[in-house]
Amino acid sequence: MKKYYVLIAISLTSILLTYCHGSKKAMKTAKTTYSGSLQTVIMANCSPCHIPSKGGNKEAYDNYANVVKDIDAMINRIQLNPGDRGFMPFRGKKLNDSTINVFKQFKADGMLEK
């Protein structure tokens, strides 16, 4: 009888691990998009300077086309240290690594709009 319970426990464990592996794979396929992730980060960290509706007069990053055009420069500038020439955000402190990674992941995922 004990062998029967052990066999059932092993079978259930292997089934659970199989499904667990599949969910991790599904999570990895989620892509960072402009409208899904990056737009919110830009609105929170690049406003008002790069958001015309908020009074900004710099390059507008409230639209997908301008962000795609300037993504390399944006990534380079937000990775600089405060005090370095070209550092962004101009009046703020350096963005944290997870915020910078949203920009990098957007580029790595193919710069999808939606």
Image (spheres, helix red, strand yellow):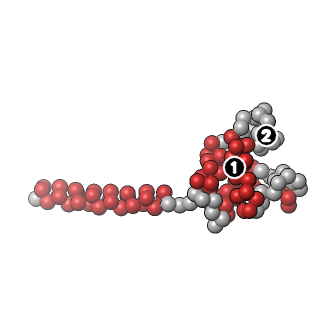
Label drawn at residue 86: 2
In the drawing, does residue 90 fall left or right of residue 81? right
Question: Which is more toward the observer, 102 or 65?
Answer: 65
Q: Residue at x 78, y 32 (%)?
A: 83
Identify the amino acid type marked 1.
Asp
Marked residue nearer the N-terminal end (2 or 1): 1
Three-letter code for the amino acid on which mark 2 is drawn: Gly
Please count the marks in the image.
2
Q: Position of residue 81 (x, y in %)?
A: 72, 35
Name, please, the residue furthest toward the left: 1
What is the secondary structure assignment of the residue under circle 2? loop
Q: Image point 69% across, 49% down: which residue?
A: 72
Q: Is residue 36 visible?
A: no
Q: Describe residue 10's horizontal placement relative to residue 38 as left or right.
A: left
Closest to the observer: 67 or 18? Answer: 67
Residue labelled with disc 1: 72
Q: Quadrant of the N terminus?
A: bottom left
Evaluate if marks 2 and 1 touch, with contact meaning CB atoms under 8 Å apart: no
Residue 7 point in image, percent of width and height? 17, 58
**Badge number at residue 53:** none
Distance between the Cα atoms at labels 2 and 1? 13 Å
